[in-house]
Image (tube, helix red, strand yellow):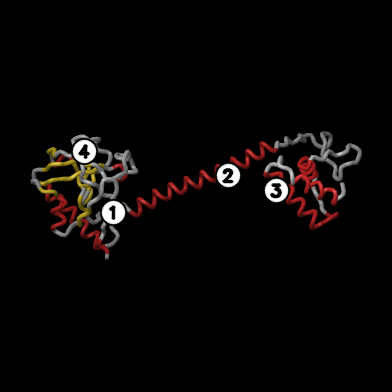
Amino acid sequence: MEHEDLKSRIEIALGRSHLSQWQRQFLVDIHARLMKYGPNTRLTDKQRAKLFEAIGYIQSSSPAPPQPRPNKSQSATWRPRHRRSPVAREARYLAGRFARAFGFALALVVGSLVYSYVSHPHTTFSSGPSPALPDAGSLRPLARSQFTITDGDTIRLSGAAKGTRLVGFNAPESIEPRCKAEADLGRRAKARLKELVATAKLELKMVSCSCPPGTEGTYACNYGRSCGSLFADGRDVGEVLVSEGLAVAFFCGSTSCPPTPRPWCG
């Protein structure tokens, strides 16, 4: 087939609506090559076969093909190649696009969770009662042997998988401080909390965390920690630490908190 005739057939085929996206792009590429190289355009047998299939041209059986094809006598391992239909190629293309889009969305979700954890390592909580918590909103006696102290604003009850964040204040970090001043003050706040609970009458009031509804107790809410207020001889330990300059007041709304105050590093 002359290249001018081939160009005309391609242009006619491009005007039809039955082509798949892959076939349409293939015809555009071949047409561009014909325009550039003219009669000197070279196509492989595979390209020529796909081109004829796309434009609906049926080759005559009389002329010999421009290049010989392998046959069974030439190679013992020769196998006829299975040609995918246009529908199968389109489905494979769409599946690849879906996989890439899903992977990108998953990366965004993971990235946002990591950023939230790094930016807000101490999400704090409201003091409103929650009917989903046992003894929520009511004081209950607490023995010193029933919990350990993690830092100035976090304790862990015996047998609990996660800690309990004490609400209404934020103490400096003693485990991962941002500067030396915060590290020193964090150790002092933790030591002072140990002093306050050493011999006092202790009471614990469990409260709901300041999280979106339905996330209480999950990693999305305060990294799975519970929330509460600890009282030593009737006084909130957070108020004592704030009054002594070892913590700062920090109050949240019902479902979210403002940025965590950490003024110790300037």
Tell me the kind of residue under disc 1: Pro
Q: Secondary structure at mark 2?
A: helix
Mark 3 or mark 1: name the one nearer the start of the chain: 3
Residue at the spot 84% in from the left edge and 34% down from the top edge: 73
Q: CA distance from mark 3 to mark 1?
A: 53 Å
Where is mark 1, residue-wise?
258
Q: CA distance from mark 2 to mark 1?
A: 39 Å
Q: Secondary structure at mark 1?
A: loop
Tell me the kind of residue under disc 2: Arg
Q: CA distance from mark 4 to mark 3?
A: 67 Å
Residue at the spot 43% in from the left edge and 47% down from the top edge: 110
Asked if 61 appears above or below 29 in the picture, the reply is above
Where is mark 3, residue-wise?
25
Residue 89, position in %: x, y? 67, 39
Mark 2 or mark 1: name the one nearer the start of the chain: 2
Residue 200, position in %: x, y? 8, 45
Q: Is residue 199 visible?
A: no
User: Of circles 4 and 2, which is in front?
Assistant: 2
Where is mark 2, residue-wise?
97
Residue 56, position in %: x, y? 79, 40
Query: Is 266 on the left-hand or right-hand side of 73?
Result: left
Query: Is 162 on the left-hand or right-hand side of 104?
Result: left
Tell me the kind of residue under disc 4: Ser
Residue at the spot 55% in from the left edge and 45% down from the top edge: 100
User: Of circles 4 and 3, which is in front?
Assistant: 3
Q: Residues within 10 Å of mark 3 (few under 14, many from 20)?
A: few
User: Of circles 1 and 4, which is in front?
Assistant: 1
Q: CA distance from mark 2 to mark 3?
A: 17 Å
Mark on residue 158?
Answer: 4
